[in-house]
Image: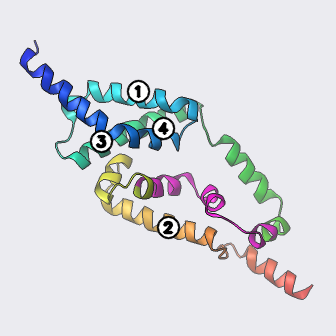
Amino acid sequence: MSDPSRAPDREHIFRSLYEAVYADLLRFVQRRAAPDLADDVVADAFLVVWRRLDELPREHEDARAWVFGITRNMLLNERRGGQRRRALGVRLADATTQRGVEAEADLVVSAVDLRKAWALLSEIHQEVLGLAVFEGLRAPQAAAVLGISPVAFRLRLSRARRALRLRFDHLPQPSGTSAAVTERTTTS
């Protein structure tokens, strides 16, 4: 039997957490799911938080990361169920790579803004950068969201930053295809 005197504390803790995290969590989900699903995902996440409130970490930043982790897991489960928001992006990326070296040269020559560079990043790189930049999580909290060690998170973050820089600055990819493009354009 639960202690009735503890119920108001539980509600107060949940309400405080909800008010502190809701806006950031909604933006987190909006960047990762269809806009019409964001409110439902956040509501479901807070339902899980309410049910698991006894597991809430004591430190504010850790509690925030815990809620983000729950939400991320819900999004991953939804993706596993066939509701992928990036399906069209993946098909477009495949079509772009199949167009060949000339299309890649056009892509390199054209102006690439940050949005386009972001779209070229892998989902893992986007996730790591998003947690660090958009959500403002430090390595220990972001690592907890992903279920990895802080050292592994820092390594992924470093790789993601390098990948973004490569795409944003038009630096040649290690595959050597841009060297062939440069050679062909200088001999023409």
| Secondary element type, mark 1 | helix
Coloring scheme used: rainbow
Q: Which amino acid does label 2 sit on?
A: Arg
Between the residue at mark 3 and the residue at mark 1, the CA separation in whole angstroms equals 15 Å
State left or right for residue 119 relative to residue 132.
right
Q: In which quarter of the image is residue 106?
A: bottom right
What secondary structure do most residues of the magenta stretch adopt?
Answer: helix
The residue at the point 32 percent across, 63 percent down is 151
Do callouts 2 and 3 mark residues in contact (Cβ within 8 Å)? no
Query: How packed is label 2: few (under 14 Cα within 10 Å), some, or many (20 or more)?
Result: some
Q: Is residue 137 above or below residue 181?
A: above
Q: Mark 3 points at which residue?
A: 66
Where is the C terminus found, in terms of image quarters? bottom right
Q: Mark 2 points at which residue?
A: 161
Where is the N terminus found, in terms of image quarters? top left
Query: How packed is label 1: few (under 14 Cα within 10 Å), some, or many (20 or more)?
Result: some
Between the residue at mark 2 and the residue at mark 3, the CA separation in whole angstroms equals 24 Å
Q: Magenta residues?
A: 106-131
Q: Mark 1 points at which residue?
A: 43
Mark 1 or mark 2: which comes first in sequence?
A: 1
| Secondary element type, mark 3 | helix
Magenta residue check for 161:
no
Q: In this view, does 69 lie above or below 46?
A: below
For discs 3 and 4, the disc positioned in front in the rendered view: 3
Q: In this view, does 8 lie above or below 100?
A: above
Mark 3 or mark 4: which comes first in sequence?
A: 3
